[in-house]
Image: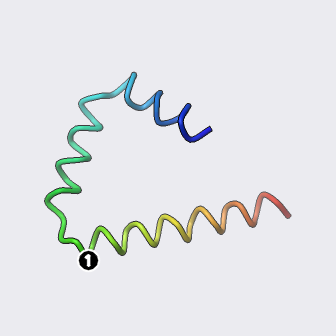
Amino acid sequence: MVLVIEGLVYALAPSLVERMLEALRAMPLETRRTLGLATLASGLILLWIFRN
């Protein structure tokens, strides 16, 4: 499912992906790490909600 969604993003808005990657490169490492952990936590919470 992740690959389908990711493939759609690359197919429909490749320039948006490039801008997002540039924005990520500009962020400090600690900010990227915090963003990744927040995304992970959000995903786990959503899985927990939808499984119950």
Q: Position of residue 14 (x, y in %)?
A: 29, 28
Q: Relative to 47, is 16 above or below?
A: above
Q: Which residue is the site of mark 1?
A: 30
Q: Position of residue 12 (x, y in %)?
A: 39, 23
Q: Position of residue 13 (x, y in %)?
A: 33, 28
Q: Give left or right: position of 48 versus 5.
A: right
Quadrant where the C terminus sits is bottom right
Q: Quadrant of residue 36?
A: bottom left
Callout 1 amino acid: Glu
Q: Relative to 19, is 51 above or below?
A: below
Which residue is at a point 34% across and 72% down the rendered structure image?
33
Which residue is at a point 39% across and 22% down the rendered structure image?
11
Q: Residues within 10 Å of mark 1 (few under 14, many from 20)?
A: few
Q: Relative to 5, is 34 above or below?
A: below
Which residue is at a point 56% across and 31% down the rendered structure image?
4
Q: Give left or right: position of 3 versus 51.
A: left
